[in-house]
Image (cartoon, rainbow, N blue to C red):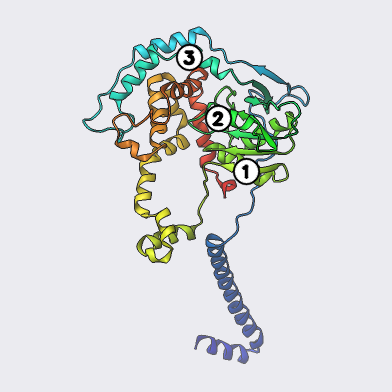
């Protein structure tokens, strides 16, 4: 009625009704267009959320600098490879022994086993063995049975074990370079039992492996990054450079834990260089649809086959386990320097923190054991040698910072 009156008013006064109609039609079309654009973007967002393909994030693959101060001029940095031998000063070992002797413990709750973490009653016996019977010099000799080297890449002294195969005279074997990468709370040492199987020729095979096991920067005998931002992408780039310096333009990769992410990135972003990828831990960022699917299947098991259901469910039990066992991840991905301060100062705390993972991650049922079944799969010497690699290098803090650097940006993982 309002527009009708105004139209007549304009006609009486000689105005142009056509212009008014045009303006109103234009306004309506504009409004509908805006609504259509909003609806389109909503559908586009939902489609990509549930079904969209994640594109490669190519940022972060250019060379960086993680040493102290500013990057030296081109050509000024030492890129040579140097032999390295593990030899820990006596004063570090003496200081460790004194700290172990001054240890104090909070009594465990009755019948708590490993459900509250490392049982302190059992911890006492482990620390007593560490202080009185464990022989680092003997373990040091074992660690040095393979050849160790260091080379500087992007300001970091990268440590690695390099084992070449002994090929019998007269045999023609393909030598396959293999980069094997550890994770947390492990070290290069976890590959020691595997290396001889890979580097010793097998009469039934026409190939043998040449194995390179680096320490992730901030772990083992590699130096620690001095700047923020050293993540799995940076590690993959450094290790690609390492293999190039060793003369390997094409090679195989293997990894577990953080190592699995590092070698997966190598396979994804440098596919022309990587012959094959093997991981003993697989992680992936699920899309929203996967989460909704998991919840639906939890209530309606018939939506999937019995085999798939058995592998992934009961959903709530799985989720409960994740909550129970992922507290370490949250604190290391948010406040690594806080937890690192305590662990760097207390060898007892460091041993409890690391060895509890060797118990629980080997088998969740070990939480129901008084001693965590810790020595069912490992000897105390093996376990404590891994702890010692963190202690003598004083790099537990830098190792857990890797969670902070990777925890908030997982685009490359998808």
Q: Which residue is mark 2?
A: 191
User: At x 57% / y 74%, what residue is drawn?
Assistant: 31
Asked if residue 186 lies left or right of residue 369, the reply is: right
178 vs 33, nearest the viewer:
178
Label 1 and label 3: CA atoms lie apart by 35 Å
Label 1 and label 2: CA atoms lie apart by 16 Å
Residue contact at pointers 1 and 3, CB within 8 angstroms: no
Q: Which residue is mark 1?
A: 277
Pick out the residue farthest to the left.
110
Tag 2 or tag 1, which sits nearer the N-term? 2
User: At x 38% / y 23%, what residue is drawn?
Assistant: 349
- Which quadrant holds residue 276? top right
- Which quadrant holds residue 254? top right
59 vs 381, nearest the viewer:
381
What percent of the width, then of the height, locates residue 241? 70, 32
What percent of the width, then of the height, locates residue 38? 56, 68
Q: Which residue is mark 3?
A: 136
Q: Secondary structure at mark 3?
A: helix
Tag 3 or tag 1, which sits nearer the N-term? 3
Classify mark 1: residues with Cα within 10 Å, few (<14), some (14-19) or many (20+): some
262 vs 37, nearest the viewer:
262
Asked if residue 208 lies left or right of residue 133, the reply is: right
What percent of the width, then of the height, locates residue 160? 62, 25
User: At x 34% / y 12%, what residue is drawn?
Assistant: 102
The label shown at residue 158 is none
Q: Secondary structure at mark 1?
A: strand
């Amino acid at each position: 009625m309002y527009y009708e009156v105004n139209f007549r008013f304009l006609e009486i006064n000689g105005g142009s009704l056509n212009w008014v109609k045009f303006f109103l039609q234009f306004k309506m079309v504009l409004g509908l267009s805006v609504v259509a654009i909003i609806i389109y973007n909503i559908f586009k967002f939902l489609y990509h959320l549930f079904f969209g393909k994640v594109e490669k994030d190519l940022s972060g693959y250019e060379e960086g600098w993680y040493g102290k101060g500013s990057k030296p001029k081109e050509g000024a940095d030492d890129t040579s490879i140097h032999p390295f031998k593990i030899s820990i000063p006596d004063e570090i070992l003496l200081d460790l022994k004194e700290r172990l002797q001054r240890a104090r413990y909070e009594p465990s709750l009755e019948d708590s086993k490993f459900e509250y973490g490392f049982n302190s009653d059992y911890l006492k016996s482990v620390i007593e063995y560490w202080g009185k019977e464990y022989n680092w010099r003997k373990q040091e000799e074992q660690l040095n049975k393979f050849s160790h080297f260091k080379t500087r890449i992007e300001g970091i002294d990268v440590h690695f074990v390099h084992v070449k195969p002994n090929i019998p005279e007269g045999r023609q074997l393909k030598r396959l370079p293999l980069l094997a990468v550890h994770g947390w709370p492990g070290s290069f040492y976890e590959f020691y039992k595997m290396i001889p199987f890979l580097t010793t020729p097998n009469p039934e095979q026409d190939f043998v492996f040449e194995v390179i096991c680096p320490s992730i920067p901030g772990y083992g005998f590699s130096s620690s990054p001095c700047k923020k931002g050293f993540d799995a992408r940076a590690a993959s780039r450094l290790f690609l450079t390492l293999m190039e310096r060793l003369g390997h333009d094409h090679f195989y990769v293997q990894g577990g834990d953080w190592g699995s992410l590092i070698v997966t990135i190598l396979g994804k972003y440098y596919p022309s260089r990587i012959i094959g990828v093997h991981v003993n831990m697989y992680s992936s960022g699920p899309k929203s649809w996967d989460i909704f699917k998991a919840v639906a299947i939890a209530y309606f098991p018939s939506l999937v086959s019995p085999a798939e259901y058995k592998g992934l469910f009961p959903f709530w039990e799985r989720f409960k386990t994740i909550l129970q066992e992922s507290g370490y991840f949250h604190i290391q991905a948010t406040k690594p320097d806080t937890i690192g301060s305590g662990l760097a100062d207390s060898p007892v705390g460091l041993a409890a923190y690391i060895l509890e993972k060797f118990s629980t991650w080997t088998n969740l049922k070990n939480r129901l054991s008084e001693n965590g079944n810790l020595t069912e799969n490992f000897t105390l010497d093996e376990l404590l040698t891994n702890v010692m690699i963190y202690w003598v290098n004083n790099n537990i803090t830098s190792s857990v910072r890797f969670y902070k650097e990777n925890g908030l940006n997982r685009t490359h993982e998808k």
